[in-house]
Structures are given as structure tokens and as C-alpha cells.
Image: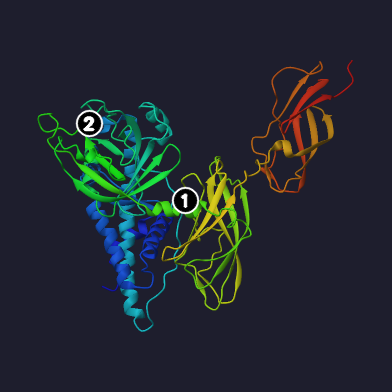
Amino acid sequence: MTQPSDRLQTRWDAVPAERQAIYRRMYQFEVKKAGASTDDAAELAVLRRLIHAYQEQALVPVGSRWVVVPERVRQAARQAQPLSASDSDRDAQPAQRRLMTIGLFLLLVAGGLLFLLVNLINRNSEDDILSATGTPTLILTPTPRVSPTPTALALAESDRVINAGEKRRDYYPVLLHIYLIPEAESRVFVVQARPVETADWRYDPNPEVASWISGLLVRPVLGLPFSEDNLRLMQMLGPDARFALQMNTGARLEFAYAETLQPTRQDTALFAQSAPGLALVLIGETDAEGLPTARRWWVLADYQPGQEIERLLLTEDDTANSTGTTLTLIGSDGVQAQLMSVAVRRSADLPPDQMMVQLDLSITTRMTAFLTGGWSWSLDDGQGQRILFNPASPEAAFPAEIPPQTTLDLRLTFPASLTAADGRLIAQSPSGEQTLWVFPLPLPPAPPSLADLEVHIERVAYVDDQLIVQARLINPQTVSIPLIDAPLAIILGDAPSPLGPQLPPIGGELPTEIAAGSALRLQVTFPYSGQVYARLFLLGREYALQLRERR
């Protein structure tokens, strides 16, 4: 086949352009991650793996992540039927939010698969044409790996759920992340401590709340309440699965899948604390007669000792690898990089509780070119979040190749929490070696406000039934100041400091903002009927006016 069918092409053309761009970025990221950007056979294997993941594991794209769609939702979608009332009522408000999210997932699936098929068909066609000139090279545009969790339970309410459990210890887990495959979006459970003093394991029936047996820390044992989704999740976990346990101190413990078991309920050996690891057990499952099942599903995971080495790398010699330090990138051919400066600023594109971290690098190559495509640059904010740099961002201008014997200044930008006090820039080579810089993160300056303006009243005059106010506005700041919703009104009366309703202007209007280091003249007109006194409200300021002599 050298050309896509008209029907397939028509369906692909019906996908909105911005969604097509999202699918391309996701597909290109998977290709780059697999090292298949210059190998057609390897890229075809990536495509088959993505389609297989959808068919076998129900993994669908959300932003730059992959998540699992429950079977009951997929079945309803195939039959074009709404979910049953029992399913809809089971989890009340959290379930409604989950169904809305899953509905968006399913809308994205069709367009994503169409893109993958069209891309494969077009590549086959290009192979026929370009067979004499070699394999084309893809231009990769990675995207940030930070996106909202698909868990149905609102994490904003997690503190209330956690505090409802036992609160007698100073060190305990608070969140459980389960990754079906590496780099996929995690399934998140809020962890609640529960003591088991008798044979009765009391737990929160919410399927999004895991119950931790209080006191088991060497190999924590967490129970997942039985539900069809949780049963399916336990059955799907395999060798590629990864787990992360977030502790109340901010520490993040990582585990790798070991095995799945179905022992009898009387087998208590799995609760032993003889080796570090993690144990998940499905609790609350009953048989057709409503009695507890004879066997339980268990998933065991091994603790990853490599993370201890990584923590040491992130903490030792912090003062040496700071701003101004030149380091040779480990895993490169002698390429040197210097962290020149660190700056933080607020951005209208970020939530109010986040800031933009700007890092300026100077990279110097030796006798060979530096291919940046296989390298990743990330910021660890010291709070358990690691944000990948996006070379496709408008401020990046990050080249795919730096020529030999060249010094090039580059800028990396990362979104980070306003509460982050220190940062770590991590440069990771294609083979996994890491180079580290550690630096403090200052608070960004407060955004400019109307109080930072200079306001000068130049003239107040009245003509017939109108009062005219002229003022000069000066912005001495280095950033623009917004003037949207700035207060502008007047109160008129025959006594000093008159009281009454505020009258809006009947003529003249404010611009949306005043640029940095600029000035403008403002003229506004208010209704007037001969009053002697006035209170003028202008850009957060109040002025007392006497308009004429009192008779």
C-alpha cells in the first residue's frame, strides 16, 4: 500500500489541528524514547507496541501520558450505551468526575490511532520514494511530563482522608503511585493508616483509598478495597510495573514488580518484614454467596537500592556543583557545561502557586559535535517533583546539534512550585549517566500592582453637566502593569467627604495595561449637576475635590 485510503484520510482530516499536533508529539516522544528515530523497523515496532497496549491493556493517551480505561466503560462505549445506574451511583461525586475524564480519554483514542495508522501508511509510501536516498530523519518535539493524575479521588481532599486513619506515628505513607508501564500516567491511591489488632482488617471501602497496616515499614502491606477496576488492575500488573510510595516527610520510595500470587487467606507469611519491599493485597472480595473468597490476590514488589545512590548524588557536594561551576557532562565526549545564572519569575501562563525557573547554560564542545537529541534536562525542585525540560518551548531555541569547538549559550525554563527553596539541574546522557548542579531558588518578586503606578492629577474642570478629570499615569517598573478592573468612580455632594452612590464615568476608558517604563495621559468624564464637593476614586487612590466656592 503506497497511499492511505480515502476513508482513513478523511477521518484523520476531521481531527482538529491542535489535537493532531498533540498526537504527533506523543508519537514522536515514544519513537525518541525507544531510540527509533532513524530506524524504520524499530519505529514500526513502536507503533505495534502502542496499538497492542491499547488492544490488550486499554491504555489511551491523555496529554503526554497513558492511562487505563476500565472495561465496563470500554464496553459501554463500544455499544454506544450509557453506564448503568448502579455504576454511576456507586462512587457519587468522585465517580462522576472519573466518568467525565474517561469520556475525554475515549474521544482522544480514535484520533490517536488514526494518526498512528496514517503515519505508518505515509512512512511506507515515503520508503518507496526515498529508497535511493536513505531513511528520513524525524524532528522530535518532546513535551513536559507533568500532567494531572487520573485518580477519581480528588487529591485536594487527601489530607482529610489520611487524617481519618490512625495518627500515632511520625513516619507513614500518604500516596501510592502504580505505573503499569514505565513513563505511563500513574494510578494514584490515597493511603490511610489502619491498625490490625485482631483478625478483622477494618478499612475505608472507597476503592481509591489504600489501607496501610500501621507499623509495617520494612515491607509495607497495603490493602486495595475490592472493585472491578482494582481487580483488573491487580491482574494487569506485570514485569514492567513500577510503584512509588510517597511518605509524609516528602521521601519517595520506589519499587519494581516481583510477582503476583493467590495464596489462601490463612497464609500469613506474606506479612513478614524480613526484606525491604512492598506488598499489595486485594481485600474485601466475596464469592457468589457473599462470603469472603478462599484466596486473595497479592502483588509483591522489590525495593530499588539504586535510588539510594541517586539520593547521595543529589545531596553530596552541594556547594561545589552550584551556579558558576563548569562540569564535564558525564557520558559525553568531553563536552563542558557551565551553569551561568539562575532566575525566577512569575508567569501569566502558570497557576498562581507556581513560578518559572530560568537557567542559563554555556556549553563548550571539543573535537566532535554534541548531539543533544538523546540527552534529557530536568529540574528536581526538592519536593519530590522532577520536571523535564521541553526543547520545543518558545523560549528554548535548543539546537539538535552543537558543532565541534563551539561555545553556545542556552536557556532552560521549568515550571516549579513557589514553595521550592532549592533546585537541582540534572543532565542525563542517553546511557543514563547524570551530571548535577545544585542551587538555591529565591522567591520571585511580587507581581506589579496599581500601587506601583505614579498618578498625577493635572486638571479637573466642569462644563455644563459634565465633570472632566485629566491625569498622567507613569509606570516606573520593568514589567507592564495591568489596568483591567481598575476602580474609576466619583461621589458628588454639597458637604465635604460626601456620602452616596459611586457614579461611573460616562466618557473615556482605561487601556488594558501600561507598558514598562512608559507614561500615558488619561481623560475621563463624569456626570455633574453643580455639586460643590467630590470624592474621586482613581486607580486605587481617593482624592478629595472642591469644585466651586460654597455659597
Q: Is residue 55 left or right of residue 529?
A: left
Q: CA distance from mark 2 to mark 1?
A: 40 Å
**Quick one: which residue is furthest to the bottom in this view?**
132
Closer to us: 488 or 56: 56
Query: Dot 1: what SS?
Result: strand
Give me the disc on residue 86: 2
Residue 166, position as x, y percentages in the image: 36, 27
Q: Amino acid at mark 2?
A: Ser
Closer to us: 174 or 492: 174
Give me the disc on residue 386: 1
Residue 471, position as x, y percentages in the image: 80, 37
Within 10 Å of disc 1 (Cα), the crowding (few <14, some 14-19, many 20+) is some
Res 42 seen here: yes
Q: Say which quadrant the N terminus sits in.
A: bottom left
Q: Quadrant of residue 114?
A: bottom left
Give me the disc on residue 308: none
Q: Residue at x 37, y 64 (%)?
A: 31
**Quick one: which residue is furthest to the left in this view?**
289
Q: Are marks 2 and 1 in contact (CB under 8 Å)?
A: no
Within 10 Å of disc 2 (Cα), the crowding (few <14, some 14-19, many 20+) is few
- Residue 395 to residue 294: above or below: below
Residue 87, position as x, y percentages in the image: 24, 34
Closer to us: 541 or 167: 167
Tag 1 or tag 2, which sits nearer the N-term? 2
Q: Residue at x 13, y 34 (%)?
A: 293
- Residue 39 to residue 460: above or below: below
Residue 255, position as x, y percentages in the image: 33, 49
Q: Amino acid at mark 1?
A: Arg
